Every structure is written in C-alpha cells, then in structure tokens.
Amino acid sequence: MGLLAQQRRELILEQVRARGAVRVTDLAERFGVSDMTVRRDLDVLARRRLVDKVHGGATAVASPSTDEPGFVVKSHRQLAEKEAIAVAAARLVEPGSAVGLSAGTTTWALARRLVDVPGLTIVTNSMAVADVFRGTARSDPTVILTGGVRTPSEALVGPVAVRALRSLNLDAVFLGVHGMAAAAGFTTPNLTEAETDRALVEAGQRLVVVADHTKWGTVGISTIAALGDADVLVTDDGLAADARAVLAGEVEELVVAPVPGEGA
C-alpha cells in the first residue's frame, strides 16, 4: 500500500531537515510517485513555511544565524519531545551531585524533573530554571544563579556570569542549544551567551547536550562546542536516520528518547 499524502510529506520534511536540501527527482524515485506529485507536496510544505522551494527541489527554511526567539515562544515548541528528553536526561543525574543547567526551554523541562532528586547543587544562568527550584517544597537543593545581563532566552550572560562559572567545578553540565550541525557543532545566535555557555561547559567534568530533532541542521552565529565535545547527546526519536548516524560517530553516547504517541 502506498503512503498517504500526509505521511509522505512528513518523510519529505524529515529528509529536508536531515540533509538540508532535497531534489524532486530523488523524492519521486524514493516514494514511487510522479515528479508532479512531489512538487505538489513541496508546495504544501512551502505554504506552511516548513521548507523553501528552489529550482528542482527544496531546502530547509533559512533562518538568520543571529535570530533568537524569546523564551515564551520557544517554550511552546516541541513540548512532547522536550518532555521525553527531560525524562531521559534526568536519569543521568546522581543524588548529591553538582549540576550545571544552561538557559533554554529543554533544560527548563529537565529542571522540573530534577526537583525530587535529593541533595543537588544546581548552578545555572537561567532565571526560569532557578524559579523552578525556588518554587519547590524541598529544602535540600542548593541553587546558585549567576549574575549577568538578561537575554531574550532568559539567560544571564556576560563577564559577571563568566567569572562566576570559571570559579566552579561541576560533576555534569546539561547544555541546551539553538542548533547543531556536522561542521558548526552546537551553536547559539547570541555571541555573548556563547561565551557564557563555553565557561559553563568548561566547569563540568561531563557534558550532556539536550536537543530535540528540530535543532539538527540549524546553525547559530557562534559555536559553543564541537559535536565531539559532548559525552552524551539526548535527543528524541524524531531525529532522522542520517542525522543519527552523523551524531553517533561524533558524540560518546547518543540517547534517543521515545516520544509517547509518535508513530501511532
């Protein structure tokens, strides 16, 4: 039985995100449909602003490398994926450890999963993450919030934050990122935040990157770390096979969290 149009479009979008670009003729051959059918699929995806049509195919939607959506906007994106990643990442946290959490909505989701882990010391430059622990009934978490200048993603960045982080030694750092790509590594659209994130990474004995599948192929203006710098990458099962293969060859451990209801 052939694929339904919506299923085919989802697979096409997956290919665009994994490869950055696709050709009509290649897609037609893969799915056993006409070039015209593929062009109609690309028209639908382009109208939804999920791809950019080009001659003979389509590319991933171009996004300025300095574009930085606000925290509230990002907090409504890929909710199921972020929750699945948070559950998987929380299993990596040992009671009584000192843990760094960068700013971001995925690390914010992780913070909500860590409130019941006893004896943690949490170091963060995220006001939202700090608020999660401030609102808990537990008295044992120690929360250290760096100072700094506030960004659209509710991060505190700059020289004050960097100096604070460089004086600390952490068991593990959980890093949320704007994008990840083979050549660029893990990136952010904010130059100052990149410097602060690098200081946070350097403070940790172990680096765990938490990033949903939509981050693959997105490149911000500044690199925080190379793919190979991550001890663990926790992502979701929406990540395309091609991207998994690249990441598995770079990071020490790739954890793919199943998203409830996906593929049902």
Image (spheres, rainbow, N blue to C red):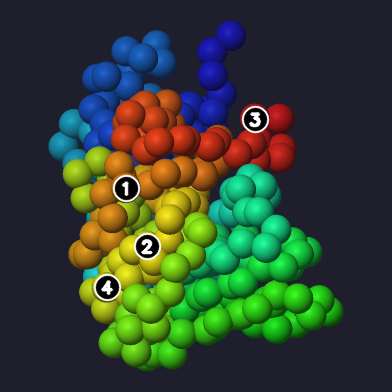
Around disc 3, counting alpha carbons within 10 Å, would you say few (fewer than 14), some (14 to 19), or many (20 or more)?
few
The residue sitting at the left extreme is 55
Residue holding disc 1: 229
Q: Which kind of residue does numbered mark 3 sit on?
A: Gly
Q: Is residue 60 above or below residue 41?
A: below
Q: Give whichever of discs 3 and 1 has the lower sequence position.
A: 1
Q: Which kind of residue does numbered mark 1 sit on?
A: Asp
Q: Quadrant of residue 26?
A: top left
Q: Which kind of residue does numbered mark 2 sit on?
A: Val
The residues tagged by marks 1 and 2 sit, at their Cα atoms, a distance apart of: 9 Å
Q: Give whichever of discs 1 and 2 has the lower sequence position.
A: 2
Give the numbered dot on residue 263: 3
Position of residue 127 measured from the top left corner of the image (x, y, whole percent): 54, 83
Give the numbered dot on residue 201: 2
Q: Which kind of residue does numbered mark 4 sit on?
A: Glu
Please indicate, yes or no, whether residue 64 appears anywhere in the rendered image: no
Frontmost of labels 3 and 1 is 1
> Camera-side residue: 255 or 73?
255
Please indicate, yes or no, whether residue 123 appears anywhere in the rendered image: yes
Q: Give whichever of discs 2 and 3 has the lower sequence position.
A: 2
Q: Give whichever of discs 1 and 4 has the lower sequence position.
A: 4
Q: Give whichever of discs 3 and 4 has the lower sequence position.
A: 4
Q: Is residue 5 above or below residue 229?
A: above
C-beta proximity under 8 Å, tags 1 and 2: yes
Looking at the figure, which quarter contains the N terminus? top right
Residue holding disc 4: 195
The residues tagged by marks 1 and 4 sit, at their Cα atoms, a distance apart of: 16 Å
